[in-house]
Amino acid sequence: MLLQLIKTRLRPYGGLLAALAVLQLINVGANLYLPTLNADIIDKGVTRGDTGYIWHTGGIMLAISLVQVVGSIGAAYMGARIAMFFGRDTRTSVFRAVGRFSAREVGQFGAPSLITRSTNDVQQVQLLVLMGCTLMISAPIMMVGGVIMALRQDAGLSWLVLVAVVVLAVAVGLIVRKMVPGFRLVQTRIDTVNRVMREHLSGVRVIRAFTREPYETGRFGTATDELTDISVRVGSLMMIMFPLVFMVMNLSTVGVWWFGAHQVAAGDVQIGSLSAYMTYLIQILMSVMMATFMFMMIPRAAVAAERIGEVVNTEPSVQAPSEPVTPENVRGVVELKGATMQYPGADQPVLRDINLYAEPGQTVAIIGSTGSGKSTLLSLIARLFDATDGQVLVDGVDVRQLDPTLLWGHIGIVPQKAYLFSGTVASNLRYGNPDATDDELWQALEVAQARDFVERLDGGLDAPINQGGTNVSGGQRQRLCIARALVAAPRIYLFDDSFSALDLATDQRLRRALAPRVHDATVFIVAQRVSTIQGADKIVVLDDGDAVGVGRHEELLATCPPYREIVESQLGGNEEVA
Ligand SMILES: Nc1ncnc2c1ncn2[C@@H]1O[C@H](COP(=O)(O)OP(=O)(O)OP(=O)(O)O)[C@@H](O)[C@H]1O
């Protein structure tokens, strides 16, 4: 997964990678040549007292060092650019994948995990790419080149290099194997910390009201302790690597001096060659150490890449058809034929065999007890979920055959949990219609009974709105969401309990103003209050997923006992209210 992700994402940067390879070659080539020149200065210049040779070779060394500096800086710059591009592209791909998800997939991963995956996980792989750009090319060349150059100096001590490299490689391999499961746990525990933190922030008022701070602090403490615990365990393994590398390096150096001194004494090797050999051995072991760095990062990046891959490769359950039907004009006729819906993992359907027909100009109200499936029914129309059985049709076409973007473009949804985006009142209202004029925004606000309060806001239409709309009241938020749907002027309106935060008088005024505005659209209203819906053309009474009654208010009063019960409980038998 890791390799595939890196390959796919780096494909567009072939040119930059080639430039990086050239710069790395220059850098490493210069690094490898310098000790040989140094040996020459000692053996041919210093020992023979040839000052001219020392100056000449020293000059060449200086020039090569300059080239090496240029190569090294250039390679670092290119590597950083490639890694940044990689991070940006991968984050974008995760963001796009999440954008295609239906509510089902978002629920499956959970928002905190999706955030960790698009930030921390991407960063882990990005770090590896950065390291890779710096070491992937230079470390192997340095290793192989170092071995060749060392052999050229003195073949008698090559067994030492071999032993050192094998000992290091085996030890590192064993440690890395132990680290992989640890890294997986680290990422999962970061998810948990994020989840607890998110819940704490969103529920801060409830936590205070119920004085549950000690409990929440405890919960957060446990989550961070668990993360610390596994991080320390993995970190300890990581820390073993450095002393190990240095121990091998130091022992090898002692070995070279020990055995080399005997050879110098016997006159088999010159002192300059031994010093160059020493430098090459250090270079070889340094490159093994650099490769070790990479190996340390690979397991964590592999886990992160797997988690990114899970998001990017998850097929959304709500799929766009391969050959979508694209009607020229959407009228907004909605029909449900035997629609049944069962959430994944649930024992039984939350909606059973729902049949319903609504056309433009009609208002359909849906009423029923909590959890009876009202929001789910609206979700089916908007194709936020697909019916597990039966059909949902818009203008006679199964919604699964329609291009989802086209369908959503004709649906104005006011969700039960009113949500506003960070920005201004105007930017929120224009969400579904960026070209709407200020006049149109004011008209929509007027219908939604929000004109007065927006006029009073500092800045009016340009008044700032916080993320989620937390700087306006629940009722104001609901009215802004209604206005937002009106500005988009869709063919089908879905109001999911959108009037619940309004007082009775405002609710009544809003419905009166709304009626002429949506008279040629198909309107669905989910409501708890009978007064909100009793004028509807059709009322659907849901009871535990079954439509136990469909008809007008008077009809249902006469024929549908569950409806009569609801009416009596709310209006005390006086059905003429509002
Ligand atoms: N994403 C989901 N995954 C699993 N079950 C769900 C999901 N959404 C809703 N449910 C379940 O489906 C049932 C119907 O939920 P729905 O939100 O449609 O009810 P509702 O009538 O709109 O309720 P309310 O009046 O409280 O808003 C509930 O029992 C709920 O627990």
Image: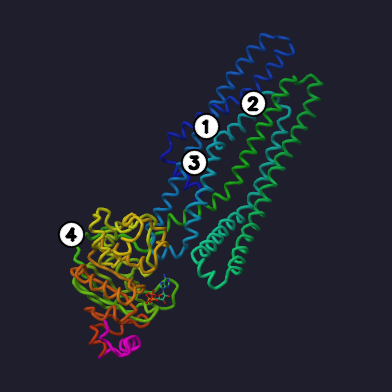
What residue is pinned by disc 2? 149
Mark 1 → mark 3, Cα distance in angstroms:
12 Å
| C-alpha gap between disc 3 and disc 2 | 32 Å
Q: Quadrant of ligand 1?
A: bottom left
User: What residue type is disc 1 on?
Assistant: Ala
Contact (CB < 8 A) between labels 1 and 3? no
Residue 196 position within the rendered picture, expressed as x and y whole percent measured from the top left? 54, 63
Q: Amino acid at mark 2?
A: Met
Residue under the image location 46 percent in, 32 percent down: 18
Q: Callout 4 environment at 10 Å: few (<14), some (14 to 19), or many (20+)? A: few
Q: Which residue is mark 1?
A: 75
* Most foreground residue, 42 or 187: 187
From the Cβ of disc 2, is ligand 1 less than 8 Å away? no
Residue holding disc 3: 83
Q: Earlier in the sequence, mark 2 or mark 4?
A: 2
**First-in-chain label (4 vs 1):** 1
Whether pointer 4 and pointer 1 mark residues with C-beta atoms closer than 8 Å, the reply is: no
Q: Is residue 219 above or below residue 232?
A: below
